[in-house]
Image (tube, helix red, strand yellow):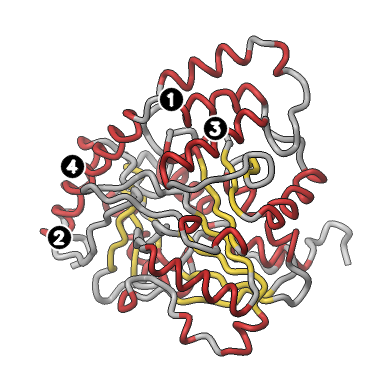
């Protein structure tokens, strides 16, 4: 056996979807294709100016040039607690119930290492953000698939999970508003989840990265608004999508102090925290005016309306999202999601994401991101009007 052979845990991982998409896009561009990228959900609008200005000021202060605290600056965690109180009416202890993250992906990827032993069962939504399943595999756990089906509003059907599995479950991943389906969950659903977590003694990890991108006056709830949630749950948030800060790598987890303590122990051994100047920018984002957040949602809503109307006019089937910047579209009859995505790339120069990349229950769908302007959205629709699938 070669000493360079990958560990078994690495061999179990599927190719990371977004890296593969990026390579296909670059191949097409190298051949001269004019690509419109509707694939990866990376906001195209800049970080608001007052946040950038805050970073500039803080980065010049030498007090921020040394190692940060592992848990994050208390002032940043206080800003998170204040934001939660204002946004959701949830009271948090900033010292014990908030933990800073190097982007929410980092926290999601590390949480299984704190609580999952080899063979432990983790309930994972499918289709879903690939990091949920992959982090469980890397930690040696066993992912148990929770199908998200159209007939259930893309919510998991816990009644379909046998009692033995529920009793053995150690942790549950959830994500609403949802990536990739854009489905939303209401407070009643979260109440049921918390009731199950108490009954079967498992941890709930809710990824709420898209809670602030919502349309038509809709305001997504937090799972921490449910009575008893802080006994069993934490919620991940990211500044990436809310404030167009994907490259800044800053987020946070909030909720149960014991769960956060476990995650913090993993982080203490693997990273040294977030550059304090970026945390100062995070404070500016959370405590400053939220007008830019609302303006960006309005822009995404315009794009949603244009794109969805255009796709519907072409006979494609979808549900108009009321949150996230994704549209989850059924593939035309006769195509699987990979075939159709490659067809759009090769015939139209459009990058979209095949649903099967989010899990086997994503087959039959493709995801489009609302992260290009109205002009390019219109150009994409013009190219699709060729109907190369017919």
**Is 102 situated above or below 19?**
above
The residue closer to the viewer here, 6 or 13, is 13
Can you identify the residue that label 1 sits on? Answer: 288
Q: Residues within 10 Å of mark 4 (few under 14, many from 20)?
A: some
Q: Are marks 4 and 1 in contact (CB under 8 Å)?
A: no
As measured in the structure, the alpha-carbon distance from the residue carrying label 2 to the one carrying label 1 is: 39 Å
Where residue 340 sits, quadrant-wise, is: bottom left
N-terminal of the pair, mark 3 or mark 4, is 3
- Sequence order check, earlier mark of 3 and 1: 3
- What percent of the width, then of the height, locates residue 204? 58, 65
Label 2 vs 1, first from the N-terminus: 1
Screen quadrant of the C terminus: bottom left
In the drawing, what numbered circle is on residue 312? 2
Q: Is label 2 or label 1 in front? A: 1
- Comparing marks 4 and 1, which lies closer to the viewer? 1
Residue at figure coordinates x 54%, y 27% from the top left: 283
Residue 316 pos. (x, y %): 19, 64
Residue identified by numbered label 4: 378
Query: What is the distance, in whole Å, between disc 3 and disc 4 at their CAs?
Result: 39 Å
**Which residue: 58% across, 36% down?**
249
Which residue in the protein does label 3 denote?
79
Classify residue 138 as left or right of residue 375: right
Work out how far the residue at label 2 is from the one at label 3, CA to CA, in angstroms. Answer: 42 Å
User: Taking 87 as reference, is 195 left or right?
Assistant: right
| Contact, mark 3 vs mark 1 (Cβ under 8 Å) | no
Q: Earlier in the sequence, mark 2 or mark 4?
A: 2
Foreground mark, 3 or 4, reads 3
Which numbered disc, 2 or 3, marks the residue that appears first in the sequence?
3
């Amino acid at each position: 056996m070669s000493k360079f052979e990958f560990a078994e845990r690495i061999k179990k991982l599927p190719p990371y979807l977004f890296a593969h998409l990026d390579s296909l896009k670059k191949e097409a561009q190298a051949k001269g294709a004019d690509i419109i990228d509707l694939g990866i959900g990376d906001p195209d609008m800049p970080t608001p100016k007052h946040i950038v200005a805050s970073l500039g000021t803080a980065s010049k202060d030498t007090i921020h040039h040394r190692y940060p605290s592992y848990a994050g600056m208390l002032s940043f965690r206080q800003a998170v607690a204040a934001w939660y109180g204002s946004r959701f009416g949830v009271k948090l202890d900033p010292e014990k119930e908030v933990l800073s993250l190097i982007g929410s992906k980092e926290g999601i990827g590390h949480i299984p290492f704190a609580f999952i032993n080899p063979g432990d069962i983790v309930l994972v939504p499918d289709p879903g953000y690939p990091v949920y399943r992959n982090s469980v595999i890397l930690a040696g756990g066993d992912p148990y698939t929770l199908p998200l089906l159209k007939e259930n509003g893309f919510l998991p059907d816990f009644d379909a999970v046998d009692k033995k599995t529920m009793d053995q479950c150690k942790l549950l991943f959830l994500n609403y508003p949802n990536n990739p389906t854009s489905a939303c969950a209401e407070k009643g659903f979260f109440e049921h989840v918390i009731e199950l977590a108490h009954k079967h003694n498992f941890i709930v990890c809710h990824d709420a990265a898209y809670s602030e991108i919502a349309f038509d006056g809709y305001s997504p709830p937090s799972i921490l608004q449910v009575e008893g949630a802080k006994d069993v749950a934490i919620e991940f948030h990211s500044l990436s999508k809310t404030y167009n800060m994907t490259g800044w790598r800053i987020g946070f987890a909030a909720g149960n102090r014991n769960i956060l303590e476990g995650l913090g122990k993993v982080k203490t051994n693997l990273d040294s925290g977030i550059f304090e100047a970026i945390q100062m920018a995070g404070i500016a984002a959370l405590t400053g005016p939220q007008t830019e957040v609302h303006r960006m949602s309005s822009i995404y809503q315009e794009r949603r309306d244009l794109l969805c109307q255009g796709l519907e006019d072409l006979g494609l089937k979808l549900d108009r999202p009321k949150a996230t910047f994704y549209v989850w579209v059924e593939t035309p009859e006769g195509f699987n999601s990979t075939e159709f995505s490659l067809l759009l790339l090769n015939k139209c120069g459009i990058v979209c994401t095949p649903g099967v990349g989010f899990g086997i229950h994503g087959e039959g769908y493709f995801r489009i991101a609302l992260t290009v302007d109205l002009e390019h959205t219109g150009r994409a629709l013009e190219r699709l009007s060729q109907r190369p699938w017919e």
